[in-house]
Amino acid sequence: MSSTDLSPAEAQEASLAYAEMFISDNEAARKARKASADLGVSPVSRGAAQTLTFLARTIAAQSVVEIGTGAGVSALALFAGMRRDGILTSIDSQVDHHLTAREMLTNAGIKYQRFRLISGEALSVLPKLADESYDLVFIDADPMEYPEYLEQALRILRRGGIVALYHVLLGGTVADRDNYAEKTLIVRDCLDAIRGLDELTSTLLPLGDGLLAGIKN
């Protein structure tokens, strides 16, 4: 079938699939994805992971906060773009996630001095982080708490820093204006609020389950 035989919807789907697979996972990322499946967590897609690397490299990120560690897929992507002396603070409420992520990061050759894994509820940990002290904040945790995570992210980000949120399309439910599920409404309202913030210049990318990125003005 040639491209001329595809419907517009099929062409768009094929293009998105091509973009997702444009950059291949390395061996460390493949192992972390397998570990994610074993833990029953959903990591960022390949395209979203490469975008995180791109964002971190673009601003030469040195101090990064991650909300939701999982098995370390996104942490590996962030480290791939961060400065060589960069430090990642990753927060997760599940101790087994941190045990797995530590193994994945160590096996990838990342020195333990470069990551700080904090086990606990993010909304209890984030208020303890200093104002305007971080280059990038990545959020991939409970969507029900995205508005609170965003508020804290904007507080701890420096000017010119980047905030990124994953799972913001929630399997297509956010785009469905007839869907009034509580989680959907919270994420949709959060996106609407971000769109109206003078404090952020943002974009929404249809990679994986949706990746929103914003630069703090």
Image (spheres, rainbow, N blue to C red):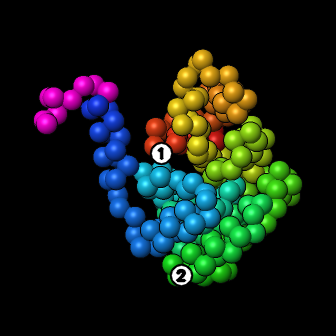
Secondary structure beneath label 2? helix
Q: Are marks 1 and 2 in contact (CB under 8 Å)?
A: no
Looking at the image, which is closer to me, 200 or 144?
Answer: 144
Dot 1 falls on a residue whose secondary structure is loop
Left/right of residue 153 with respect to residue 10 in the rendered view: right
Q: Relative to the observer, which residue lies in front, 102 or 192?
A: 102
The image quadrant that residue 181 belongs to is top right
Q: Position of residue 121 (x, y in %)?
A: 82, 56
The image shows residue 54, relative to residue 15, as above or below, that is below
Foreground: 147 or 213? Answer: 147
- Span colored in magenta: 1-9
Amino acid type of the residue that numbered disc 2 sits on in the rendered structure? Asn
Instruction: Return the residue at label 1.
Output: 208
Residue 110 relative to residue 29: left or right? right
Give the residue at x 29% y 31%. Answer: 10
From the viewer's perspective, is 133 left or right of 168?
Answer: right
Left or right, 108 with reference to 122? left
Looking at the image, which residue is at 35% across and 58% down? Answer: 23
Q: Is residue 119 magenta?
A: no
Q: Is residue 8 magenta?
A: yes
Name the residue at 53% across, 53% down: 44
Q: Which residue is mark 2?
A: 107
Residue 150 visible in image: no
Give the number of callouts.
2
Q: Amino acid at mark 1?
A: Gly
**Residue 25 screen position, x and y as percent:** 40, 64
Quadrant position of residue 78: bottom right
Eyeballing the image, is 193 above or below 62? Answer: above
Residue 68 in view of the camera: yes
